[in-house]
Amino acid sequence: MRKTRIVVDTNVVFSATFGGKPERTVERSPDPSDDKFLEAAEESGADYLVTGDSHLLKLEEHKNTKIVKPEEFMGEI
């Protein structure tokens, strides 16, 4: 059984996990500063991007990554 992989929308986790620039550039969020989280999700093959950010939540998904609120995520695992 494959383990679930997630990206959590926090600059601390993002900074600690991804030291360099992602290979692909994403320009999808209404707020360009949020695109880095979509890039991280895509690069890592994340199943979930857990966030409270309204711009990201409106997207609902990116590629194969579900974008959900923390309480939704807790209900799915």
Image (cartoon, rainbow, N blue to C red):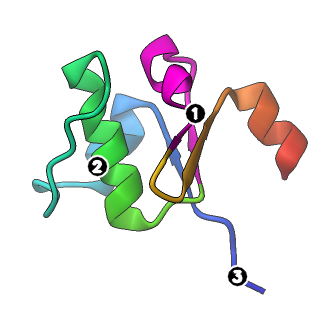
Q: Secondary structure at mark 3?
A: loop
Q: CA distance from mark 3 to mark 1?
A: 22 Å
Residue at x-position 70% and y-position 82%: 2
Residue occupying the far right of the picture: 75
Q: Which residue is mark 3?
A: 2
Mark 3 or 1, which is nearer the eye?
1
Q: Residues within 10 Å of mark 1 (few under 14, many from 20)?
A: few
Check the image and report above or below for 12 versus 69. below
Q: Earlier in the sequence, mark 2 or mark 1?
A: 2
- Name the residue type under label 1: Glu
Q: Residues within 10 Å of mark 2 (few under 14, many from 20)?
A: many
Residue wearing tag 2: 39
Looking at the rendered structure, the kind of residue marked 3 is: Arg
Q: Amino acid at mark 2?
A: Glu
- Label 2 – label 1 distance at C-alpha: 15 Å
Magenta region includes residue 59: yes
Going from N to C along the chain, the mark reached first, 3 or 2, is: 3
Return the residue nearer the eye: 5 or 13. Answer: 5
Task: Please give the range of residues in magenta.
Answer: 48-61
Residue 6, quarter of picture: bottom right
Q: Horizontal placement of 70 versus 29: left or right?
A: right
Q: Which residue is mark 1?
A: 60
Q: Quadrant of residue 51?
A: top right
